[in-house]
Image (tube, coloured by chain):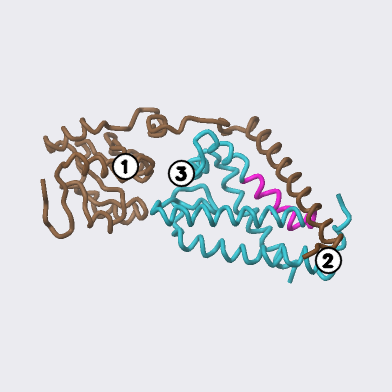
Amino acid sequence: MVMSENKKKIWILALRQGLSLIVISVAIALTVNQFRPGGINIVSDWSVEARFKSADDALMVISFEEAGKLFELQEATFIDARSEEQYHQGHIKGALSLPWQSVNDYFIEIADQLDPNKPIITYCDGETCELSHELAVFLKDMGFDNSRVLVNGWSLWLKAGLPVASDSGADNG
Amino acid sequence: MFHIARFFLGGVFIYASYDKIINPDDFARIVFNYQILPHNLVNLAAIILPWIELIVGFCLIIGWWIPGAVVIVTALLIVFISASLFNLARGLDVHCGCFSAGVLETTSARLSILRDTFFLAVSFFLIYMVFWVKKKSGFQSVEFRG
């Protein structure tokens, strides 16, 4: 297929315009970001430790060992931030379900089961899962100051063979 | 029809860029959650992407550089849809961050893919009009510019 001279011209024109638009956008974006309040770093640290800080910069992450100890002593409330479906398929034994997706509905349901004096440990699945972090921040705002995040909680819990429960009622561990 | 389509898509892109420009740190978190870009590029993408959306949106509405804007809009939509499909396929549930940087945006992945596919169809229509039917599209006004 031979492109007509005109057609070729317009594609070249389009590409030139497209590239120019991108260059202009990049220039504006970087300039604005530099001078506006609330601009962000061009490169920032996205490691687990750096990400899981609450607004007041207190490290919110609880180590797996510490969480395991609190579980053993039954001194913490575990909250599953994943969907209800995933919770029913399997969760940390004794954990409450509070899916972040509809946190407002579920929060009212479980609020009276939460003890403000006990540490609350939220978890979801995967190192990058943000649900538990968002949930912990939310719970802090709600007055549960001792809310912590167990990063990658569900996977680590399973791997360690600690007690879990599922919908069928068959607990194990 | 051509003008309706470009006003519509231009409006969608400007609307989509607004909240992300206001809240770059929230949008960066969403870009990060997609788990596609290397960490070093996450913030850069979060800073630049909304501005590209805003500027091509304006171009579509005002009628400047339409051929270039249409190509970028189409490319962006293809990237968005691919990224969502990719994450859907590997079972990663991310907030699409399509129209706002808020984490509570609750559109499901499937729905946002469906919606983006519709936008993509509109942008293909624009491509067709601009590159094949340009005479009827009012394109002559921009053909020999820049």
Give coordinates of residue A170: x percent, y percent. Answer: 11, 56
**Eyeballing the image, is A147 above or below B127?**
above
Question: For the residue marked with disc 2, what is the amino acid?
Answer: Gly
Task: Tell me which residue sits at (31%, 51%) in the image.
Answer: A82
- Identify the magenta region: B50-66
- Circle 1 residue: A139
Question: For the residue marked with disc 3, what is the amino acid?
Answer: Gln
Give coordinates of residue B123: x percent, y percent. Answer: 67, 62
Disc on res. B138: 2
Q: Residues within 10 Å of mark 2 (few under 14, many from 20)?
A: some
Whether residues under marks 2 and 3 lie with C-beta atoms below 8 angstroms apart, the answer is: no
Kindly report the distance in space between the C-alpha atoms of the residues bearing marks 2 and 1: 56 Å
The quadrant in which the N terminus of chain A is found is: bottom right
Q: Secondary structure at mark 3?
A: loop
Q: Main secondary structure of the magenta part?
A: helix
Kindly report the distance in space between the C-alpha atoms of the residues bearing marks 1 and 3: 26 Å
Q: Secondary structure at mark 2?
A: loop
Task: Tell me which residue sits at (82%, 57%) in the image.
Answer: A8
**Eyeballing the image, is B137 above or below B20?**
below
Q: Nearer the viewer, residue A139 or A129?
A: A129
Kindly report the distance in space between the C-alpha atoms of the residues bearing marks 2 and 3: 42 Å
Considering every residue shown, the one lying at the far front of the view is A1
- Circle 3 residue: B35
Q: Nearer the viewer, residue B76 or A117?
A: B76
Q: According to the rendering, which colour does chain A have? A: brown
Going from N to C along the chain, the mark reached first, 2 or 3, is 3
Q: Residues within 10 Å of mark 3 (few under 14, many from 20)?
A: some
Q: According to the rendering, which colour does chain B have? A: cyan
Question: For the residue marked with disc 1, what is the amino acid?
Answer: Leu
Q: Is residue B61 magenta?
A: yes
